[in-house]
Image (cartoon, rainbow, N blue to C red):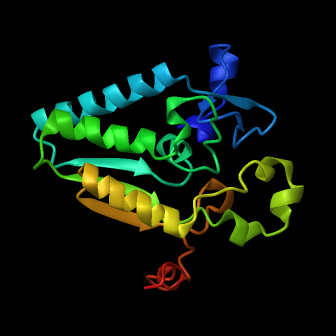
Amino acid sequence: MGRVGDPESLLNKHRLPVSASWNPNFYIPAIPCRPLSDRECRRIIGNAGQAAADAKAMTIDGVYLHGHEGYLLEQMSNPAFNRRVLSHFSDWQAFGLEMVREIRRRVGPDYPLMYRIDLSLALNATYGERMEKVGSLRKFRRERQVGETLEYVANLVREGVDLFDVDLGCYENWWLPHPPIRCRAGCSCPLHGW
């Protein structure tokens, strides 16, 4: 879960939580999350491929990757969270594309693969100039833009994603991906240009 995971790892295992870069933990921003090493990233990608192969072997209908709301896959594939410089995964698309490639390698071309993604974190739209003033938000100014997301989606399709679940927002503006019940169905469609 990366920076949105329970910071208990610090208390129970005496280890910092992890993320794509040095990011504050969502629940306790004073606790830093350390960047995953390239080796750790490759291990996660391999484990995702194995989990997909296991799911297929158990006759589960398909795989659903959660690259949204600021979870670890989102952290690695969004420049808001991934500010790596000297890393194979400093290309913010690399982690997600390699994960999909590894899953496809393990399950073949016909096994359904769905990817949940946000069109935008909408942090700048939500917080405006507070993005410069609030310490826990300041690092996240360079969020993936809609055009970049669409380019990433096209690359994910080329690697084998069959279906997308598109939303917007993250933990810092949780009401966007989880609109209150008073909102009409499809309330975020105008934001997506639909």
Point out residue 115 in the picture as x, y percentages from the top left corner: 34, 54
Q: Residue at x 56, y 50 (%)?
A: 78
Instruction: Report the residue that reaches farthest toward the right.
Output: 133
> Which of these two is toward me, 151 or 59?
151
Q: Residue at x 26, y 54 (%)?
A: 158
Is there any visible trace of residue 90 in the rendered image? yes
> Which of these two is toward me, 18 or 182?
18
Q: Residue at x 71, y 52 (%)?
A: 140
Q: Locate residue 14: give its quadrant.
A: top right
Q: Examine the rendered structure and indicate whether residue 63 appears above or below residue 123.
A: above
> Which of these two is toward me, 132 or 169?
132
Q: Locate residue 87: give its quadrant.
A: top right
Q: Is residue 153 left or right of residue 81?
A: left
Q: Is residue 65 left or right of residue 88?
A: left
Q: Is residue 5 left or right of residue 192?
A: right
Point out residue 122 in the picture as x, y percentages from the top left corner: 63, 67
Q: Examine the rendered structure and indicate whether residue 79 appears above or below residue 149.
A: above
State the count of labels. 0
Q: Residue at x 12, y 41 (%)?
A: 108
Is there any visible trace of residue 55 in the rendered image? no
Q: Examine the rendered structure and indicate whether residue 50 appears above or below residue 5.
A: above
Q: Locate residue 47: give its quadrant.
A: top left
Point out residue 156 in the picture as x, y percentages from the top left corner: 33, 53
> Which of these two is toward me, 79 or 13?
79
Q: Is residue 8 left or right of residue 52?
A: right
Point out the image quarter for the C terminus.
Answer: bottom left
